[in-house]
Amino acid sequence: MEIKKAVIPAAGLGTRFLPVTKSMPKEMLPIIDKPVIHYVVEEAIAAGIDDIIFVTGRSKRSIEDYFDESPELEMHLRNSHKDDLLKIVEDISSMVDIHYIRQKEPKGLGDAIMRSRKHVNGDPFAVLLGDDIIVNKTPCIRQLIEVSKKYQCSTIAVEQVPRKKVSSYGIIKGQPLEESLYILEDIVEKPSIDKAPSDIGAIGRYVFTPEIFDCINEAGIGVGGEIQLTDGIRMLNKMQKVYAYKFAGRRYDTGDKLGYVKAIIDFAIQNESFGSQVKDYLCKKVD
Ligand code: G1P
């Protein structure tokens, strides 16, 4: 089971970050000097993915521009001998093969993934949601690929989520199989805390067998009047084994304002050129 393709849905309206997302995709919000989506693409590449399908929507052109060549800027940097910056800019446009598909209407995550069906073309594939940055030596999506290869099945990344956040996630019921690994028994999209089967939530990383597409189709419209990926996974679990894996790594939910600020602070502290100054500044601030 070789996994070389990744789908990155990036069609959401980013309402949690209004007004900035009125004219800027949430995926382009910067963590210091790189947009969130850059980290997600880096994770996919580090996991051996060589073909990325972005499912975008209206006003997401800047994502395409970001990963495209930028001849005027490159010429300017070349002429002014700013070779370091030139390399940074050139490297971005040659990172990986990227294809773009539009989701015409915001009909949900399941629908966004359905748009990639033709391109995925019957292969198993990875899905990375653009909101999460996950830091670990072995990329989170690589960890899922390993599980999928070993057990020849779909695998979803999960972590324990705070009780008051349960209703923001797809929540699983799982039977522990081995350290960090569950056989999926059920998954429910955004349940209320009293109806939730656990406090273990699906975060934005998945590996799927291609049968997921038929299952999303069959599941139809779900919570919030949207086509939910979770309902597709639930359906898939009825015909094939699906595993849930408690991944190793630090996750930043940059789709949430507090998560976004935490990511900026941590990345700033770790910055080679000014990290120690940021630390000093924060220490003085909290004194
Ligand atoms: C989506 C999924 C949900 C999952 C979450 C992870 O929800 O529908 O099952 O737990 O991503 O971030 P969203 O955050 O798009 O509302």
Image (cartoon, grey):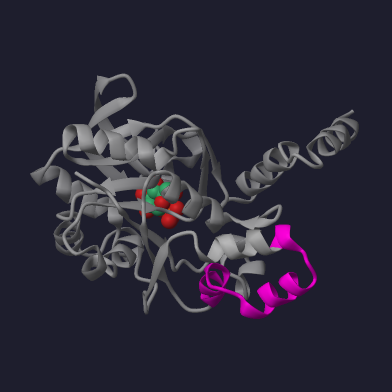
Question: Does 206 appear above or below 18?
Answer: above
Q: What is the quadrant of the N terminus in the image? A: top left
Query: Is residue 119 toward the left or the right of residue 266 in the image?
Result: left
Nearer-the-camera pick, 276 or 133: 276
Question: Does 229 appear above or below 62?
Answer: above
Indicate whether residue 69 is drawn in magenta: yes
Q: Who's the residue at 82% across and 39% down the image?
A: 278
Q: Report x, y in % for residue 212.
A: 19, 55
Indicate whether residue 31 is drawn in magenta: no
Q: Is residue 190 visible?
A: no
Nearer-the-camera pick, 265 or 97: 97
Query: Is residue 257 toward the left or the right of residue 150 in the image?
Result: right
Q: Report x, y in % for residue 192.
A: 39, 43
Dominant secondary-structure state across the stretch colored magenta:
helix
Q: What is the quadrant of the C terminus in the image? A: top right
Q: Residue furthest top?
A: 179
Q: Report x, y in % for residue 232.
A: 22, 54
Nearer-the-camera pick, 42 or 179: 42
Magenta segment, which residues? 60-85
